[in-house]
Amino acid sequence: MKRIINTKLFLFFILFSSGLLAQDNPLQWIEFPDPLYKVSGLPSWDENKPDLFRLPKSSKNKVRKPVWNLAQSPSGGRVRFRSDCTDLSIRLEYPHTGNMKNMHTFGQCGVDLYIDNTYVRTAIPKDSIYIEFLFFDKRPKMMRNITLFLPLYSSVKIQAIGVNPGAQLEDPLPFVIEKPVVYYGSSITQGGCASHPGMSYQAIISRNLNIDFVNQGYSGNGMGEPEMALEIAKMEAACYVLDFGVNLPDADSLQKVYGPFLKILRHHRPDTPIIAVTPIYNAPEFWEPNKATFMRDVIRKEIAKLRQAGDKNILLVEGFELLGPEFADGFVDGVHPNDLGFLAMAEGLQPYISRVLNLSGRNYKLNKSQ
């Protein structure tokens, strides 16, 4: 799709918020949603729009209430397009301005701007839940690949996106494969505690390989219940990455759900590759084994059973290989990775994803010439 914005100019009232800048010139505001802007990472977008939810609204009474509440945070959701705009702003509405103790407001509520896969800045709420944020203005007119990463831990409504009158808008460049990688897990999967949305390990991998992804991490609630296995199985995927377990109370609880979860997923997706990740290191293990130690054995045994039964499309990845005790500085609170930790996780997991998707040895990063 390609369109030139040529509609009547109008002046607008700016909702001031500390740290936000006013513009001298009027913008052309395009109400969201609009076909000009491609929404990625939210597979139920067609059913849910304009709401940026991670599960379909039809599942509200099928999943546990905490899961549904967390599904309203659009972690992994992105708005993508190409434009030669010289000015770019966004109008957002938030339910709150962030209240987590171990995670910065930028990570909780921010909307990241990436241009040609390079981080530029983050829009966040401050004194008001309604904001108008200027990403850039008066920049050279040239075609850019623009991606807006949505909040990890807060719902948000995009009211409109503003560009300079006459700006050209085009469809985003395609991913190298059509289907996304779908991740299921806990708060670490959801993105806790990245400093801003583009720093979850899935987002880093997606930029490195130019692949789409869906984030189905649920903070404190990645418990592997059959209802979630069914929801995950409904999502068309190039690969499933299972990174759950630590939200359950103990290894026995994990034993009861892990095999059945895999069985449901395999029943509906018999040939789609699955990567099963054992829990990464956590700081309490410095002193003595804890539940994560024993959960690793549960996952290893369940994957071994499937492989012995002939399932060659399931792969085990050790969490210690992604983030082990030698990289303990990669945590915020001893449990959740910081940006160093997420970079390490992305670096460790990316080769396995490349392998199962037949992307090994190739670099798909976007650049300004594309």
Image: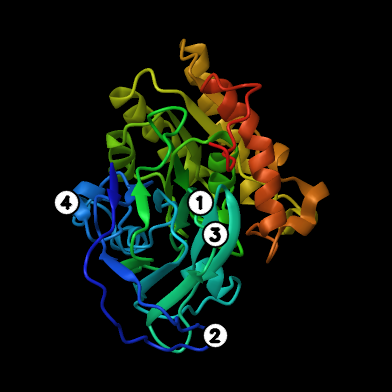
Give yes or no for contact between labels 1 and 3 (Cβ–Cβ under 8 Å): yes
Report the Cα–Cα distance between label 1 and label 3.
6 Å
Give yes or no for contact between labels 1 and 4 (Cβ–Cβ under 8 Å): no
Q: In the drawing, what numbered circle is on residue 19?
A: 2
Report the Cα–Cα distance between label 2 and label 4.
39 Å
Q: Earlier along the polypeptide chain: callout 2 or callout 4? A: 2
Along the line of sight, which residue is nearer the eye, 224 or 345?
A: 345
Quarter containing the N terminus: top left
Q: Earlier along the polypeptide chain: callout 1 or callout 4? A: 4
Q: In the drawing, what numbered circle is on residue 142?
A: 1
Instruction: Identify residue for label 3.
Output: 140
Three-letter code, disc 2: Gly
Along the line of sight, which residue is nearer the eye, 275 or 137?
A: 137
**Left or right: residue 45 compared with residue 97:** left
Q: Quadrant of residue 329?
A: bottom right
Q: In the drawing, what numbered circle is on residue 58?
A: 4
Report the Cα–Cα distance between label 2 and label 1.
27 Å
Three-letter code, disc 3: Pro
Residue 70 screen position, x and y as percent: 37, 62
Residue at the spot 50% in from the left edge and 13% down from the top edge: 312
